[in-house]
Image (cartoon, grey):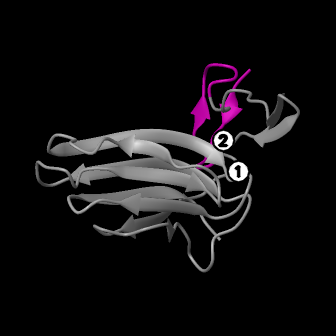
Amino acid sequence: MTDNFQDGSVSPVAGAGKPPATKKSTESGGIHVPHFNQDTVVGFDLATIAISQTDANLETSTGALGDHLETITCVVTAVGAGGASSLKDGGGSAIPLTPVNAPIGTYIIPIQSISLVGAWNVTTGANVTVFASGIFS
């Protein structure tokens, strides 16, 4: 048995052209958490949060409950007390991303979560810029 690919070619191995089976959702503590796979996600939005911002929304228009945050990249450009950055789910408590005295560098943080309260918010210090990828409203 063979599988036909979209470009018309044929795989001699059965099942080789099919993506692995994944569950579309799971129940975790009573909260429905959707899983995204190659069949449901076409591309991500990119949001840039400049230095010294407070509760900046990750958005393409307003940001909202249900926005998917895939990855945060924090770029710390100088040594000192301005290296802190944090993330909030809507009006929730701040989750630290980088400490106050973070060393110079790039920090890639996988989040892979859905907002349960409102738009994702990021706060940055004087020495850190944040790039976020996800599906933002």
What residue would you read off at disc 2?
37
| Discs 1, 2 touching: Cβ within 8 Å | yes
What residue would you read off at disc 1?
40
Q: Residue at x 69, y 20 (%)?
A: 14
Residues 16 and 109: in front is: 109
Asked if 39 appears above or below 82 in the picture, the reply is above
Residues 58 and 17: in front is: 58
Q: Residue at x 35, y 60 (%)?
A: 124
- Regarding mark 2 in the picture, which secondary structure is present there? loop
The location of residue 51, given as percent across then percent down, is 28, 67
Q: Amino acid at mark 1?
A: Thr
Q: Quadrant of the N terminus?
A: top right
Residue 9, magenta (yes or no): yes
Which stretch did the figure color magenta? 1-16
The location of residue 25, given as percent across then percent down, is 81, 36
The location of residue 74, given as percent across then percent down, is 31, 50
From the viewer's perspective, tell me whether residue 1 is left or right of residue 47.
right
Residue that lies at the very extreme toward the bottom in this rendered image: 61
From the viewer's perspective, tell me whether residue 66 is left or right of residue 130.
right
The location of residue 48, given as percent across then percent down, is 38, 67
Asked if 20 appears above or below 56 in the picture, the reply is above
- Cα distance in 3D space between marks 1 and 2: 6 Å
Residue 84, magenta (yes or no): no
User: In terms of image quadrants, where is residue 4?
Assistant: top right
- Regarding mark 1 in the picture, which secondary structure is present there? loop
Asked if 44 appears above or below 18 in the picture, the reply is below
Q: Residue at x 52, y 49 (%)?
A: 94
Residue that lies at the very extreme toward the left in this rendered image: 79
User: In terms of image quadrants, where is residue 117?
Assistant: bottom right
Task: Classify mark 2: residues with Cα within 10 Å, few (<14), some (14-19) or many (20+).
Answer: some
Q: Residue at x 21, y 42 (%)?
A: 101
